[in-house]
Structure formats: C-alpha cells, structure tokens
Image (spheres, rainbow, N blue to C red):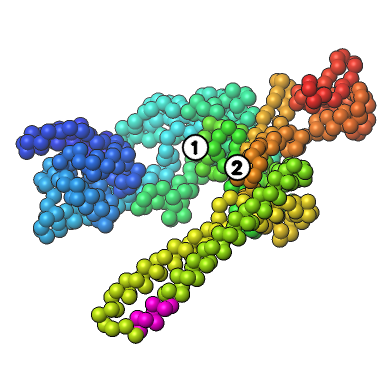
Amino acid sequence: STDQQQDSPARQRQDIEALAQRQGFRIIRWYEDHGLTGTESSKRREFQKLLADAKAGTFAAVLVSEQSRMSREDIFDVMTHWKLLRDAGVAIVTCQRGELQFDNLGGFLTAIVDQYGAREESIRLADRVVSGKRLAIRQGQRQGGALFGYDREILDEAGRVIRRVCGTEKFRKPPGWSSRLVPALDSKAVEAVRFIFDSIGDGMSYGSVARELNRRGCTTLAGKRFNGTVVRRIVTNPVYAGDLVLGRKRRGRFRSLHDEGGITHENVHEPLVNRQVFARAQDAVQRRYRTSRATTAGRYLLTGLVYLAGSERRLHGYTMRNSDRPPRLYYGLAPRYYEEYPQESDRPSFRAEVVENAVMAKLRDYLTDKRNQRVIQAEISRRTRKAQANVEALEKQRGAVRARIERGTENLALANPEDVPGISRLLARWRDEEAKLKEKLQQARGEGGPTPESLAIMARIDQLLDHLNEADREKLAFAIRQTVKRITLRRTRLGDGRYRVTLWDGAIELRDDLGSKGTIPLTDDDLSGPGRWRDAARYVREHGGVVYLGELAEALGIHKAFASRLLTQATLAGKIRNLGHQQGWTARSPRS
C-alpha cells in the first residue's frame, strides 16, 4: 500500500481485526507487502508466501481490506490465484463485500467487475503520475531522490528557500513546495564529478576512474566503493550539465514518459561541468568499445568452461569493437554480475587469444607426453570397442523388434475382427520397445564423456594449432569441451604504494573420465598480460647474469628513470631479484 490515510497498513489492520471479530475468525498470521505495486504479484514476497501457505493448508481463509489490496493484476492473471485458493479450500473475505463467491455466476461476475475496476484504477493512477511528472519537469522541478555531487534546496509556495537537504538526508516536502539542485557543500564530491568527466574525456576507462576515486577515499552516496557502472551512470547523466531529462528509460508498467520520447528542460540549475566538457565526455563514451555476442561457431574455443577463480561465476566470450582498430575478443563476466556485485570495481577480463593459446599450449604439452599418450590411446581403444559393441547389440535388438512389428502389421490386416484389439495392444507394446531402443542407440553413439572422435582430435592437437583461424576451430572447441572439465582464471594486483603490477594464473581441470585424472596449472608466464615491466624481466632472465640500470635502458632504448621503474615493478612481481644498491638485478631462481 501507499502511505496515504485511506490505504495505510494501520487502517487496513484495524478493519481486518474488526472483520475477524464479527465473523469469528482467529488471525494466525499477517502478510504485508509495503510500498510494492499490486500489479506484479511475482515481485511480492509476502504474497507468494501466502499462496504457498495456502497450498500447505495453513489457514482456512484470507481476510483483506478490499479486493484491490490482494491484487491489481489483469483478470486472467488473478484468476490463477483464485483457482489456487479455491482448490486449497481457502476462502477470500473482504471488509467491503464479504466473502467472494465463486460457486455461483452472480458472485463470480461481481468479483470480475471489481477486479477490472481495480486494474483500471491502476492505469488511471499511472496516467496521473506521468501527467504530474510532465508538468513538474516543464516547471524545472527535478524528479527523483539524492544525486551524487548535488544538494537540494527546498522552496515553499512563494519560492523562498526554507532549508538545504544534503546527500541521502530524508525530507518530505509539503504539498505545493518544490526543490532544486545546487552544488553540494561536500567539495570532495563536486571535485569527484569533475574528475570523472575530465578523465573519461581524456580516454580513461570506467574501471580506471573508479579505482582512482577509491584510492582517493571517495565513496558513493550510499557510502560504498565506486565501480565502473556507477562511473558510467554519472558521466552519461545530462543533469551534471544543468539539464533535467525525464524518460531516458522506460519506467512504469502502464504509462511512461519514455514512450513519448522523454522530456528535456535545459539550464534549470547550476551545472557541475560546462557543456564543452560534457560534450567531450559524451563523444568519448560513443567512441568506447561496444560489446556484442559472437555468432561465428567456434569463435570462443573455451565457451562454457572458463570460471573466475574462487567463485562460481562463469566468464563469457565477448567482442570489443572500435572503428580505429580490429575487433578484440575477451573472456569476462556477464552483465548480470555487475548488478549482483556492485561493490566490486575490479572485474577482470582476459584476452581470448592469450588464454586460448596458453590452454592449447598446456594441453599440447600434456598430450605429447609419452605416458599420457599411452593412457589416451588406451582410452580411445576401450571406448571405441565399447561403443561398437553397444551399437551392434542395440541395432540387432532393434532389428528384431522392427521385424516383429512388420509381421504383426501384416497379421493385423488378415486377422479376424475379434483378434484385432489384442494384436493392436501387442503392436503398441513393440513400438514402445522400439522407441526405447532407438533412444539407447542414440546415447551409445555419442553420449557420456569424451568420445573416441574427440580424443582423436585432441591427439592431433599439433596440426590443429596451426589452423586455429580456419574451420577446424569448431571441431577443436567440441573436443576441448569433451576433454576439459573446467578452467579457472585469476588476476592479482600487487602494489607498493608507488607502483602496481598485475599477475595472472589459473588451472585446467581435466575430466575424470578422460582416463588420466589431474589438474594442469597455468602460471603468469603462460598468461602474460600487457606491461613493459615484463620486457625488463624477460631481458634480465635471458641475459643470464647481473644486469645494471644503464645496460637495461640502453638495451630497451628508454630513459634510465623509466628503466628504474620497470625494474622495480618486475621485482615487485617476483620475476627478478634486486641484489642491492648499485649491484644490479638478476633473474629469480625457481626456488626463491
């Protein structure tokens, strides 16, 4: 219900208690959905609990203030609830009309008319709400609650400022009063907004901006850490340029300003960024990569196998496109996780090419091992013999049943009328038997663990790796799914306050029925991500001895200051070891 007096929960409770006392009911439980629309019962937790308890026989009747309090859904939708309650032997009793009578035509029609009226009232209410919002936006009154970077000034009927409402502070305006946005007294929030627009305009990513805000100690209005989604919502909101826009998204079940194209009212309040900065940021947003699903079969070799380490969140393949460069393929979290874990600003994504090459290289090493080859070949032979034996036996049984069906059909045509029912029942039983054998035959030909064909494909992995961009990718993707149970990936960030490095690792978990159980580790060297410090680590490792700062700078063609930074990052990552002041760097041994 709303908080209006005629719909208040307290008033409804009083009416229901009086009804129970008059008719001799004993109230054993209350079900209350506060502030939720009655037009969508699936979103009302208490209402769904009421239906479940009714089916369990918890009570004999449901008492409601009026019929609309139970549901404002369409007649055909609400009938499913009525039927459920009726079948459970539960009566519906209202304070206004008494018990709803579904056992006679008059009572049923009355319930339908009342339900139709409740539905129409919701539609009329939606029309009034949209009309009121349209008028308010044209008068420059913002609709909605608190906004990051802004406070609200409350004005009375004469337009005098009565008070200032900061952040998420609650304040209910009396009828006739209005509000307007003013820059927040919290200068840190205002500077954060301007930093967001400037940074996005300069080409920074949403995640990078969020991490920098978190490093500065900034928090959202809810006191939580920033993430890329919050940054995107801020930078695409015209309110920060001084405009009021309503109807950018469709809201409301029946009516929405979005259906009319939305309403924009310019220069309503003081902007936090000028229009040039806002336009520059919007251009950067439009130039950003777009995500889309790939439709090419086999484009993502590891689809359905890659998970984020330490969780059950699966990584999906997606394509990043930009007009200035070729499309790039990634494995990353699905969009729904962005809503389920809004507090996480660090949502890793992995270059598909790097991950797939690393996985294939590890599988190649595993499959070229002589011992593993013997195990795989033995498994191929065993499964081939078993599959052939099963298929031959089932085909023989199916042939025998098919012959009986054909003979029975011929006999049916020549049988006496009194024998027809018996022969028909016998034919039906044989046809059921044939259908079951057909199903078993299909399973024997291609179900249950790695097939001989998939294992044979994996045995030819050396040849297939040379043709990853050709049609063999689809066949290879199938073989991988039949051979690999799960791939977990992890991205770890390390920092010392001045510099930061990113390390990658993971594991390939083989299927238990492959013939050789085990897990193949993926190290940072297998999944090397971007970073110039890796060039420094690689040079030190390949050099084989002590490397000095000037030597590295000259070899890489960079300044000594930059070379010093790269060496510090490589040391932080554990790739090399600093021998001490002016004593150079050396590769870290596997044991250290």
Q: Which residue is mark 1?
A: 340
> Could you say whether the residue bearing mark 2 is in a helix, strand or loop?
helix
Residue at the (54%, 63%) spot, across then down: 393
Does residue 193 sit above or below 304 in this rendering?
above
Whole-percent x, y for residue 99 in the image: 11, 47
Residue closer to the observer: 354 or 343? 354
In the rendered image, the quadrant that contains the N terminus is top left
Residue at the (37%, 81%) spot, across then down: 411
Q: Main secondary structure of the magenta part?
A: helix
Would residue 99 be found to the left or right of residue 391 on screen? left
Residue closer to the observer: 373 or 220? 373
Q: Closer to the camera: disc 2 or disc 1?
A: 2
What is the magenta range? Answer: 406-413
Residue closer to the observer: 312 or 193? 312
Q: Which residue is mark 2?
A: 512
Residue at the (28%, 51%) spot, across then down: 73
Whole-percent x, y for residue 572 in the image: 76, 23
In the rendered image, the quadrant that contains the C terminus is top right
